[in-house]
Image (cartoon, helix red, strand yellow):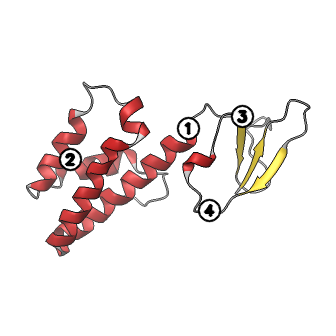
């Protein structure tokens, strides 16, 4: 991935980042490019609000752990318990803390509680509704 910092003089500053780079590398004023150039349908450069990259990374991370839990829940209960502990770490992310209201947080806690009892319904529902297009296939 190539990341360009929008420069006031009109010339971008370019730097390369590895695909495994953390979302914290996306800071205010950066344009993310996939391949040679990121643009909208009209060909104009795309800019993103600060935190968008972090939110996408958190979503990808959460979906990956949900899919892992769904797989391990039926094949390896000890692994599923570890997966659920990892899912609960989502509570520490900026996506959860800054973008999820107190009235919405029960959605996650309810899913984790039911998952702890072996019920995959709410986690499966979240994967089906929200994990498409985030780099993990739909379960």
Above or below 15: residue 26 = above
| Left or right of 52 on screen, residue 27 | right
Which residue lies at the image location 26% right of the left edge and 62% below the top edge? Answer: 83
Tell me the SS state at disc 4: loop
Which residue lies at the image location 72% right of the left edge and 41% below the top edge? Answer: 31
Q: Quadrant of residue 66?
A: bottom left
Disc 4: CA contacts within 10 A as few (<14), some (14-19) or many (>=20): few
Per the image, the residue denoted by label 3 is 29
Kindly report which numbered mark, 3 or 1, lies closer to the viewer in this rendering: 3
Marks 1/4: CA–CA distance: 17 Å
Q: Position of residue 80 (x, y in %)?
A: 20, 66
Q: Is residue 139 visible?
A: no
State the mark number for residue 19. 4
Marks 1/2: CA–CA distance: 25 Å
Labels 3 and 1 touching (C-beta < 8 A): no
Marks 3/2: CA–CA distance: 37 Å
Marks 4/2: CA–CA distance: 31 Å
Kindly report which numbered mark, 3 or 2, lies closer to the viewer in this rendering: 3
State the mark number for residue 52. 1
| Left or right of 126 on screen, residue 61 | right
Q: Position of residue 6 (x, y in %)?
A: 80, 36
Labels 3 and 2 touching (C-beta < 8 A): no
Q: Nearer the viewer, residue 88 or 65?
A: 88
Among numbered discs 1 and 2, the one appearing first in the sequence: 1
Q: Quadrant of residue 91?
A: top left
Per the image, the residue denoted by label 2 is 122
Marks 3/4: CA–CA distance: 20 Å
Labels 3 and 4 touching (C-beta < 8 A): no
Marks 3/1: CA–CA distance: 12 Å
Tell me the SS state at disc 2: helix
Tell me the SS state at disc 1: helix
């Amino acid at each position: 991935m190539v990341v360009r910092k929008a420069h006031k003089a009109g010339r971008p500053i370019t730097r390369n980042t590895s695909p495994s780079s953390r979302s914290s590398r996306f800071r205010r004023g950066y344009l993310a490019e996939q391949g040679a150039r990121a643009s909208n349908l009209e060909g104009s450069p795309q800019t993103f609000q600060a935190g968008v990259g972090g939110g996408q990374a958190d979503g990808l991370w959460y979906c990956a752990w949900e899919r892992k839990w769904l797989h391990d829940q039926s094949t390896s209960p000890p692994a599923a318990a570890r997966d659920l502990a990892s899912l609960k770490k989502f509570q520490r992310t900026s996506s959860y803390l800054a973008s999820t209201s107190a009235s919405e947080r029960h959605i996650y806690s309810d899913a984790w509680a039911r998952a702890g009892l072996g019920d995959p319904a709410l986690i499966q529902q979240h994967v089906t509704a929200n994990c498409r297009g985030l780099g993990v296939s739909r379960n």
